[in-house]
Structure formats: structure tokens, C-alpha cells
Amino acid sequence: MLTRDESISVCPMSIAYQPMNVKQQQLLPVIVVVCILLVAGVGAFFAYRTYGGDIAYYLYEKDHKSLPGFDSKKAYLKDAYQAIHANPKDAQNYVDLGSGQYGIQDYTNAEKNYLKALELAPNASVIFWNLTHLYIQTKEYAQAEQYAKLAIERISDKPLGYEALGELYTYYMLDKQSELPNVYKTAFEKTRSNLFLLLLGGYYRDHGMPEQGIEAYQQWIARSPNEQNRQAVEAEINILKKKLKK
């Protein structure tokens, strides 16, 4: 311990104030601006991490709130933006956002989000289904056909690609209706879904081929003995049999 006699003498500050030179004065505003930008940048970073989804939704709402049905989709769209911000690697979040945008006829942004979802989940049949129907709405039938066929190519054991292609050929690309029997036969072979036997029977019924229609319907009955619409299918068979007798 120091005694009173061993007190320490403290040297006064020996460095006198020196004014900044010209170069330092010129640099000062730059330093101040850099500091402000750094502080602002850090603040923006943390604000984005916390509110990025809300910001993205706000910007979207600002430009698209006049679209039909926007008010009914506001909460859905906001949730989708927040989900993407929280987990940008989840394909379902982009599907949800695209579906919300599809619902308000914002097909441009819906397409972008469906395609982003497809990048993340290249074998998800629902994305192909959504893209096909989006292009049907925009009357881009070649694009719709491309994605329906791509679904069949990538996931041939799932029915949605065949269903989408069948719908496209039945109602929109009428010049390709003759390809429907092959589409339905292949679909049944690959997926074993009885739905395609019904669709095949309906095609033959509508195109004046009662014998083939009866065969398809009877095959469906054999595989679906307890289906609720069995009576309706049996009625179709009886109608086709009467046509055969004429």
C-alpha cells in the first residue's frame, strides 16, 4: 500500500490541442458519412431480418391492390411472403404465394413463383399441375402442354400430369383430341388409377365408338365393385349397348 509520503505525482496532459490540418478537414465529412452509412446498414440488416416478409408484402400490395379479389387474399398473401422470408428454401411457400397471386389474376408473378418452386422441388406434381392451368388461363397452350408432358416424364407414376394433359386436349387443343386414348391408356398402365378407365370410356362414348366404350367401362366396374357411381356407369353401358343394336 502506498503511504502518504509515497504519493504518486500525476503528470498533467502534455499534449496540447492541435487544430486539424486541411487534409483532415477534407476527410472529416467522408468519415462522418461512412459512420452514418454503417450504422444505417446495420439497422437495415436487422430490420430486414425481422420484418423482411412484411416489407416484401407491403411493396407487393402497393402495386397490386387494385387487382380483382385482392382484399380477400390479403392475409393469405402476407402469410406467404412471411413464410418465404422465414424459409426461402421451402418450395411449398412459393407454391402458396403463386396460388394466391393466381387467385387475383396476377399470372406474371404466379408464374415466377411456380417456376421458383419447381427449381426447389423438381418432381412435385402439384407444381406442374399449377403451371399447366396457369398457361391455360393465359392461353399459352404450347407452354401448358410442355409442363404437363414434363410432369409425365419426371413422375410417370403420378396421375396429375396425365389429367392435366387430358384436360388440355379435351377442351383447349382440340386438334389433339385423337391422342387422348393413348394418353389415358398410358396413364392407367403407369398409375393404375381407375379414373383413366372412366375417361377412356367417356372418350369412346363421345366419339361414336360404343364397343370400345363398353369395354373400358366394364373394366372400370371390375376394378371398382363398390364405387358409389357404379350405377351411373352401368347406365352408360346400357346406353352404349343400345347404340350397338342400331
Image: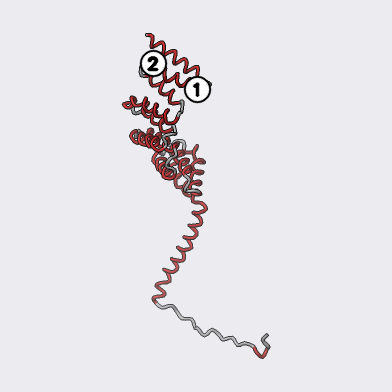
User: How far from the left and from the top, in percent, is residue 64?
Assistant: 43, 42
On the question of residue 19 being in view, the answer is: yes
Quadrant where the C terminus is found in the figure = top left
Residue at 50% across / 19% down in the picture? 230
Q: Residue furthest top?
A: 246
Q: Amino acid at mark 2?
A: Glu
Mark before the other along the chain sequence, 2 or 1: 2
User: How far from the left and from the top, in percent, is residue 26?
Assistant: 39, 72
> Height in image: 75 above or below 217?
below
Query: Circles 2 and 1: CB distance less than 8 Å?
Result: no
Q: Is the residue marked by circle 1 packed among few (<14), some (14-19), or many (20+) residues within 10 Å?
A: few
Q: Quadrant of residue 177?
A: top left
Q: Quadrant of residue 209?
A: top left
Q: How many numbered discs, if any?
A: 2
Q: Which colour scheme appears in the figure?
A: secondary structure
Q: Is the residue marked by circle 2 packed among few (<14), some (14-19), or many (20+) residues within 10 Å?
A: some
Number of the label disc, if any, that sits on residue 75: none
Q: Quadrant of residue 5?
A: bottom right
Q: Looking at the picture, tell me which residue is in the foreground, 165 or 112.
A: 165
Quadrant where the N terminus is found in the figure = bottom right
Q: Amino acid at mark 1?
A: Ser
Element type at mark 2: helix
Q: Which residue is mark 1?
A: 224
On the question of residue 54 being in view, the answer is: no
Q: Looking at the picture, tell me which residue is in the foreground, 14 or 228.
A: 228
Left or right of 201: which side holds 78?
right
Q: CA distance from mark 2 to mark 1?
A: 20 Å
Residue at 54% across / 84% down in the picture? 13
Element type at mark 1: loop
Number of the label disc, if any, that sits on residue 211: 2
